[in-house]
Image (cartoon, coloured by chain):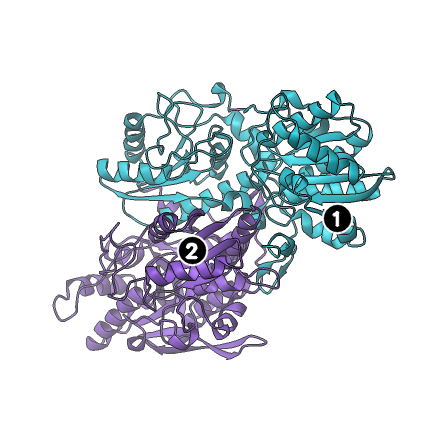
Chain colours: A cyan, B purple
């Protein structure tokens, strides 16, 4: 009998622990797997021999596995670490597979976004090249919904529900004053505008907000932006705007770039201040009250308003990853195939990791309106079912009950 | 038989509509009241003759009154309008009491904070001075919890629950990375730090965050602030800080004042950017990742994470306002008296409005620690029960179901 190892990487989502819970419970039940290990802080935890025994934590604690499903962020911690190119330097790979060998790890599960899938690609390539019998599986997660090979990513639905609910509540907050106002809501998304687009779910029979939606997929023009606002103001006192943090001008420069142009290890520009930048522009150009609201990390951590469909899928994707790995699959990512929209139905499959890693799935142009200031109904219909359902979260003394994560902080 | 009129004023809270619902239902049931009117946009709605008939909207719609209890912001809209001094100019008063007379209004209910209680004080003084038989009652609301004459204000408990829950979720989001970081969470509160203090409820057996709490009641020193962070960093990688938007230096100048010093009609400085200001200071002075998060209007509008105790009290305070007014009280504010803390028990009373209007109840010095960077346990015990209980909010297609507020936007 062999063992398995799980790690989590990249930014959190509300349901990445639901996937972890799914992997652990399937692995505990699988007769081919003896012990379930977790690496603390992603692949760095493997490199640093920082493993914990998940079997001993969870095997007699089914309740804990349930609570894990609705615990924010990442029970195993995270990292943003890019493995070196195999052709250049094999040192890290030797270290990692040495840990696998010593711990008798035959299955490695990596939950993450497109950067993490790069790690899955590299590790599986290295294993195949060196005839090492370790199955490497990727489990998708990202609030950005920008992974290829899957209809959508676990984590997106819950973030979309948070964004849409908050947008609706912001509309209530805004409509109460009888004075002209512009409210700019900045939503996460460097290159993909899926989450910003989800704000459109806040519209209903009595609420037209967000009145304008600006996405990173199409060029952003300050001139058009101000004219769009003026056009809405002709019929509506309180204008509410959803804007991706990653909107860029026609030359591809981030609107917020002037304020902050540090880039992270994967070469992504670190953004902040798109909303604030636009707030200053509007308040200089138009005579009205202006406010910008940055939804910030709440988008990826507000489990208290997560989507039950999302949690269920994230958990199932975890279960299936174990099944696929034990069946001999490797170098693949578990994926969700939508088979019907109304009622929403789906099935689980897996795809070659090379089709996923290091790529970004953007909103197709035809799902953005001609004026580049809104989305089409196809996109609304695509996102809506992913937000359906509410988990039954336990509360104690007014606060949600989440799982103890002191193992991430005690060693500090 | 006479009629009654209700209006809402100031900033929203998650439960101001629960008080409105409480007034409407008690007024509909009261044999001495014929028609229940609402003024749109507070006292301005009275001045502008912008009234709606709440009896016709709600009398046969008990479900609507239930949904109103958990509908964000203000069903009747709001205003920030200060009545002129009676001794200087009676014009507005004559207009208002003329509307009361024409609509046969014998009871006027004003839901608001300390500025709104100023309106209650002035109207009741004018009525008494001129022998006008209109009972004027104030119903407290504010997330700031800064009203005298009541143990706490409806709206504070829900905002506290949002702040504490979000603080806990931010802690999860922060602990996952194995790199030193400082996270600054900016919480509403110009002069009173009650809501910022409520962030301490996020602490539990495995979470010590927020590690530092800075309140507007005590002077803020950047020198001490940086030393406080360094002291925490000796034992903890990820430092999380709760800070009131209204913190001031020893000369009483707002820390964020340099960025924005416009003041509103009541003479309050309009603040934004305290978190951002501190973020810049920390990132210049200490070598670590720094992020600031402004909780913004979500604190007062996120009904989806409101407190059931708060909703229940807000509703009851509304009920009681009708009872007191019909019993002949005027120029008073309904208040909550805490009679026991564990288990939490309270009773409802009313207090002379002159003891409440235009005053601010701040955190007593003995509930703040000696170092001015945290609160004492007395304050935690005071806030905790106000956040208890979760309302049963209906969801449809992934989003909470709130009451239609198109009457606030259609006339635009």
Chain containing the residue with disc 2: B
Up-down relation of residue A146 to residue B50 (above or below):
above
Q: Which of B179 and B93 is in front in this view?
A: B179
Q: Nearer the viewer, residue B226 or B401?
A: B226
Q: Picture quarter containing residue B263? A: bottom left
What is the x, y in percent for residue B34? 40, 65
Q: Mark 1 points at which residue?
A: A54
Please tell me how crowded label 1 is: few (under 14), some (14-19), or many (20+) other residues with Cα within 10 Å: some
Q: Is residue B252 visible?
A: yes
Please tell me how crowded label 2 is: few (under 14), some (14-19), or many (20+) other residues with Cα within 10 Å: many
Q: Which of A370 and B276 is in front in this view?
A: B276
Q: Which residue is drawn at 59% across and 63% down?
A: B204
SS under mark 1: helix
Q: Give the Cα separation between the discs numbered 1 and 2.
A: 40 Å
Q: Name the residue under label 2.
A: B300
Q: Residue at x 29, y 72 (%)?
A: B359
Q: In this view, does B102 lie to the left or right of B299?
A: left
What is the x, y in percent for residue B43? 28, 59
Q: Which of A224 and B170 is in front in this view?
A: B170
**Disc 1 + disc 2, Cβ < 8 Å:** no
- Quadrant the N terminus of chain B occupies: bottom left
SS under mark 2: helix
Q: How many marks?
A: 2
Q: In this view, does B219 lie to the left or right of B154?
A: left
Q: Is residue A21 visible?
A: no
């Amino acid at each position: 009998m062999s063992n398995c190892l799980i790690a989590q990487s990249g930014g959190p989502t509300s349901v990445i622990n639901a996937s972890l819970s799914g992997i652990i419970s399937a692995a505990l039940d699988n007769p081919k797997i003896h012990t379930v290990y977790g690496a603390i802080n992603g692949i760095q935890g493997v490199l640093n021999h920082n493993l914990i025994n998940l079997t001993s934590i969870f095997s007699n604690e089914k309740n804990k596995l349930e609570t894990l499903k609705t615990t924010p962020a990442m029970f195993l911690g995270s990292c943003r670490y890019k493995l070196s190119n195999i052709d250049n330097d094999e040192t890290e790979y030797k270290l990692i597979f040495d840990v696998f060998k010593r711990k008798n790890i035959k299955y490695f599960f990596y939950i993450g976004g497109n950067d993490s899938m790069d790690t899955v690609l590299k590790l599986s390539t290295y294993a195949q090249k060196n005839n090492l019998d370790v199955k490497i599986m990727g489990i998708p997660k990202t609030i950005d919904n920008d992974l290829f090979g899957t209809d959508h990513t676990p984590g997106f639905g819950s973030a979309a529900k948070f964004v849409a609910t908050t947008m609706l509540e912001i509309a209530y907050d805004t409509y109460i004053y009888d004075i002209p106002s512009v409210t700019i809501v900045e939503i996460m998304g460097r290159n993909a505008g899926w989450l910003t687009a989800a704000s459109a779910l806040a519209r209903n029979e009595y609420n037209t907000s967000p009145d304008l939606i600006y996405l990173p997929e199409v060029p952003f023009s300050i001139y058009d932006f101000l004219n769009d606002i003026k056009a809405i103001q002709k019929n509506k006192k309180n204008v509410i705007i959803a804007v991706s943090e990653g909107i860029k001008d026609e030359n591809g420069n981030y609107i917020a770039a002037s304020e902050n142009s540090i880039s992270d290890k994967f070469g992504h520009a670190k953004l902040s201040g798109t909303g604030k930048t636009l707030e200053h522009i509007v308040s200089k150009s138009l005579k009205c009250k202006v406010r910008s609201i940055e939804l910030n990390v709440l988008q990826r951590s507000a489990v208290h308003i997560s989507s039950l469909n999302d949690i269920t899928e994230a958990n199932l994707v975890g279960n299936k990853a174990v099944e696929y790995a034990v069946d001999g699959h490797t170098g693949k990512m578990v994926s969700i195939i939508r088979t019907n929209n109304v009622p929403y139905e789906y099935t689980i499959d897996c795809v070659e990791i090379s089709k996923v890693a290091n790529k970004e799935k953007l909103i197709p142009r035809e799902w953005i309106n001609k004026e580049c200031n809104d989305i089409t109904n196809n996109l609304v219909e695509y996102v809506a079912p992913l937000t359906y359902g509410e988990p039954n979260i336990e509360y104690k003394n007014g606060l949600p009950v989440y799982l103890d994560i002191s193992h991430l902080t005690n060693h500090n």
